Image (cartoon, grey):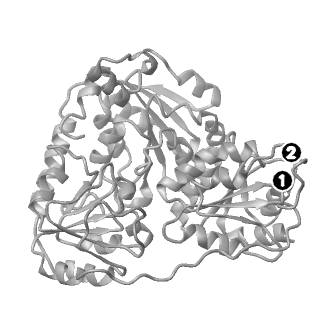
């Protein structure tokens, strides 16, 4: 039976997520659990997709999110979109009507293919003669990773094979340009994570940036690692300081969706990438090499810019940590001090994210997660829960703002039920800080984005979290020192001055 075969083949994923129905989705969940897969009931199908994608990112193997047809899938689409933005491999599995079922049978019927066309790599029935878990998961994991939509439609005899792609040839004289460069700079996209290139990047003696989505691709405590490249960094950022000195930019899977603005560099640029960027790169590359190894071997022979990079990073850190009032930089510093042996940082979207991307020094990519490509507000809590489920040996800390705390807050019950080592730090300026900037600048209403004095602490008390309020870096350090991750999750409310919060990103973005 296809359901049993799928469950047996998916056993190595360890975890599946979703909201079960009473039909084939429940039968699949039963089969998965019979084969040793832990199924985690979520409160929203979109959260299930994000959790499955997060497990896929950390394990390299597509996990499953499961829902009913129609409204269940409709709820899941938002989470699938987040996985598409962030290149997170997962299988979105839902009940469905088969192609031969009469239209008169209309209960919960939707054109599910049309609904998922923009947020999935493709769609297949689970059929007796067709791709099974292995082929479907490989499709989701293949470059560029993302969701694959699988329909459970009863007895389906056959389904199309998954698509294959022909390898592309190199374009341009990439190796010659790299060999001749005297001041090359590397900018690594998430491809560098999937190819396992961190050791190569850590050994270089030239400036290395990453996109926000690939943060931690190189150890950010090393002197040659310059932090995050966004394409819009202002005068205080290392990208504004270092890139004008370069004579060649070497991207590693540097694709336009991973930056805030893609445009030509002031010097030449090449990309190391096995696929072509959809819609053109925007970076005006003079060449593309499909295999990064030869170019990285050439870059390993070069040396420049290490001292300049370390100075630029130190200058920005000093600027961010200077304010006397309590702001996100001080909170991130308190977290770093509280976990000298390591912690996984998950950063949701907001002005605190701008600060976190630049000041949080990720030692490796699996210890730093965010919506670095999509800037998808609210993704952080499901990401953090999925990561803590996959790897509870490392404490997980979520930095989240006033906008991101609420969309999937019910999933906090799962964190408490599983007693996860998760700390949620709610960095609150009383509103949507980054949106408020536009309202202030253009004299528009601020009313829709302000919630002064609002608190979520009571809600997390109700969920059974340990809770606290900290209004300084020192106070937060004490809260974190008292927290025992093995004892279950923590929620800490961090109130911050809204005007200082507005000003803290000046010169950065």
294 to 380, vertically: above or below: below
Name the residue: 17% across, 33% down: 322
Q: Nearer the viewer, residue 337 or 183?
A: 183
Looking at the picture, how far across and down is residue 491, in whole percent? 51, 32
Question: What residue lies at 21% left-to-right and 37% top-to-bottom?
Answer: 321
Residue picked out by circle 2: 106
Q: Nearer the viewer, residue 297 or 278?
A: 278
How far is disc 2 from disc 1 in space, using C-alphas?
Answer: 21 Å
Residue at the location (49% across, 39% down)?
Answer: 423
Mark 1 lies on residue:
26
Provide residue 206's location: percent of width, then percent of height: 17, 69
- Viewed as shown, does residue 275 lie left or right of 247? right
Question: Would you call the spot at circle 2 few (<14 residues within 10 Å), some (14-19), or many (20 or more)?
Answer: few
* Label 1 secondary element: helix
Residue 66 is at least partly visible in this image? no
Q: Does any portion of residue 83 appear in the rendered image?
A: yes
Mark 2 and mark 1 residues within 8 Å of each other at the beta carbon:
no
- Which of the 4 image quadrants contains residue 31? bottom right
């Amino acid at each position: 039976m296809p359901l049993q075969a799928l469950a047996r083949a998916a056993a190595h994923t360890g975890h599946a997520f979703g909201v079960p129905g009473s039909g084939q989705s429940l039968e699949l969940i039963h089969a998965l659990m019979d084969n040793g897969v832990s199924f985690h009931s979520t409160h929203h199908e979109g959260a299930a997709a994000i959790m499955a994608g997060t497990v896929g990112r950390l394990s390299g193997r597509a996990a499953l999110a499961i829902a009913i047809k129609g409204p269940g899938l409709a709820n899941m689409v938002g989470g699938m979109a987040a996985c598409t933005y962030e290149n997170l491999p997962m299988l979105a599995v839902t009940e469905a009507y088969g192609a031969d079922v009469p239209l008169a049978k209309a209960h919960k019927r939707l054109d599910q293919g049309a609904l998922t066309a923009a947020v999935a790599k493709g769609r297949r029935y689970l059929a007796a003669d067709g791709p099974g878990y292995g082929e479907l998961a490989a499709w989701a994991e293949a470059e560029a990773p993302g969701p694959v939509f699988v329909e459970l439609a009863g007895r389906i005899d056959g389904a199309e094979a998954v698509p294959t792609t022909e390898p592309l040839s190199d374009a341009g004289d990439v190796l010659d340009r790299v060999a001749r460069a005297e001041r090359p700079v590397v900018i690594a996209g998430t491809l560098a994570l999937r190819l396992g290139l961190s050791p190569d990047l850590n050994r270089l003696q030239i400036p290395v940036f990453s996109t926000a989505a690939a943060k931690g691709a190189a150890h950010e405590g090393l002197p040659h690692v310059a932090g995050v490249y966004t394409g819009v960094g202002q005068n205080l950022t290392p990208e504004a300081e270092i890139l004008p000195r370069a004579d060649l930019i070497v991207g590693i899977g540097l694709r336009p969706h991973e930056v805030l603005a893609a445009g030509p560099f002031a010097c030449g640029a090449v990309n190391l990438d096995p696929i072509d960027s959809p819609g053109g790169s925007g970076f005006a590359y003079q060449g593309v090499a499909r295999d990064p190894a030869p170019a990285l071997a050439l870059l390993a022979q070069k040396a420049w810019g290490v001292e300049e990079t370390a100075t630029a990073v130190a200058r920005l850190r000093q600027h961010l940590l200077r304010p006397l009032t309590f702001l996100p930089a001080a909170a991130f510093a308190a977290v770093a001090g509280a976990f000298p042996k390591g912690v996984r940082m998950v950063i949701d979207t907001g002005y605190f994210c701008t600060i976190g991307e630049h000041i949080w020094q990720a030692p490796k990519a699996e210890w730093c997660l965010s919506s670095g490509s999509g800037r998808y507000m609210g993704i952080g809590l499901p990401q953090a829960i999925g990561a803590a489920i996959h790897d509870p040996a490392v404490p997980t800390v979520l930095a989240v703002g006033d906008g991101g705390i609420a969309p999937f807050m019910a999933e906090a019950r799962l964190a408490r039920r599983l007693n996860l080592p998760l700390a949620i730090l709610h960095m609150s300026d009383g509103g949507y800080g980054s949106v408020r900037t536009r309202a202030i600048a253009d004299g528009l209403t601020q009313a829709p984005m302000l919630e002064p004095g609002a608190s979520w602490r009571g809600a997390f008390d109700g969920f059974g979290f340990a809770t606290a309020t900290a209004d300084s870096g020192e106070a937060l350090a004490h809260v974190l020192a008292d927290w025992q991750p093995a004892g279950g999750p923590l929620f800490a409310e961090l109130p911050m001055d809204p005007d200082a919060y507005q000003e803290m990103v000046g010169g950065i973005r």
